[in-house]
Image (tube, coloured by chain):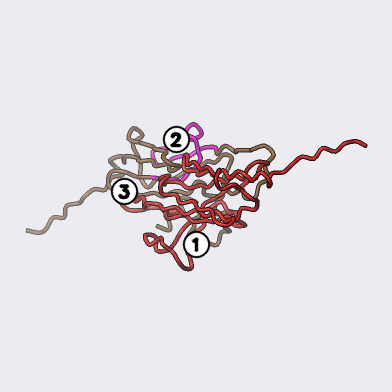
Chain colours: A brown, B red
Amino acid sequence: MNQFRQQLGLAFAGAGDEIPLRRRVALSYPAVRMGENEEFITLEAELPGLKLEDLEITLSSPEQLSLKGTHQLVEPEHATWTCHERPFGSFERLIDLPGSVNSEQIEAHLDAGVLTIRMGKNDEAKPVKIKVKADQ
Amino acid sequence: MTNSVLAKTKTTELNGSDSVATGGVHYTPRTDLYETDDEVVLSCDLPGIMADDIELRFDRGILSLRCQVKPRPLAGHDLVSEYGVGDFYRSFTIPVEVDATKFSAEYRQGVLTVHLPKQERAKSLKILVKVG
């Protein structure tokens, strides 16, 4: 698991991380969650405020997904800002997948600021059950 | 409000927590807060919730936001989990007199925007300077 995290080249918001918070965040926007079962790999990212037309999802290789987008900046006239924490500007993140996925079996939803991508695995990425033969 | 990091911040309530589902842990939503001549506007990142689960309260100059978040389990087992999913809580001291009867709030694309119109007497006035 740790090795997998390192492979991704990402920093995680876990306790004991030595990378400063700001950098840790900048390196890995958007933060993602990923899970898998035998058939699918599911990826989730929180992208509140992002419009569908400002998001581009590309399968750059069967094992790598790219998330690209732009958070539009709202600039009201004559405003005094007290707090400006929400992200703005463009981002791009490449995510290594744990196995190859079928480009024709990808579904993505952006709902209430949560992006969910469900990817069907290629046969070689699916687990194979091995029968153990017993001596007669 | 000084906590201007780009990540959701995880904090634990010291007492009076009612977020039993998340073990008393809640997240601080990233927020933009600005003031114009007429109103104070607040935008909070609250991804993955229903508008009905947002509880906004204004009491003696403090606007508090509490929001229940339903867990979103991923299918199968987790591989990567860079953020947590849980309830949101944050409170804001509103620095000017606002008219609580005219508040409005909308939730769109995971962002809650609250408009707090100022009291007439709190609005800034332009003063014309005459040449003598």
Q: Give the residue displayed 54% in from the left and 37% down from the top.
A: A70
Q: Secondary structure at mark 2?
A: strand
Q: Predominant secondary structure in magenta?
A: strand
Q: Amino acid at mark 3?
A: Ala
Q: Give the spatial CA distance, label 2 vs label 3.
A: 22 Å
Q: Quadrant of residue A19?
A: bottom right
Residue A64 visible in rendering: no
Q: Amino acid at mark 1?
A: Thr
The residue at which mark 3 appears reads as: B75
**Which percent across, then down, holds residue A82?**
65, 50
Q: Secondary structure at mark 1?
A: strand
Q: Give the spatial CA distance, label 1 vs label 2.
A: 35 Å
Q: Quadrant of the C terminus of chain A?
A: bottom left
**Which percent across, then down, holds residue A56?**
48, 34
The residue at which mark 1 appears reads as: B11
Picture layout, residue B30 above or below residue A17: above
The magenta stretch spans which residues?
Answer: A43-70
Badge 2, how many Cα within 10 Å: few under 14, some, many 20+?
A: few
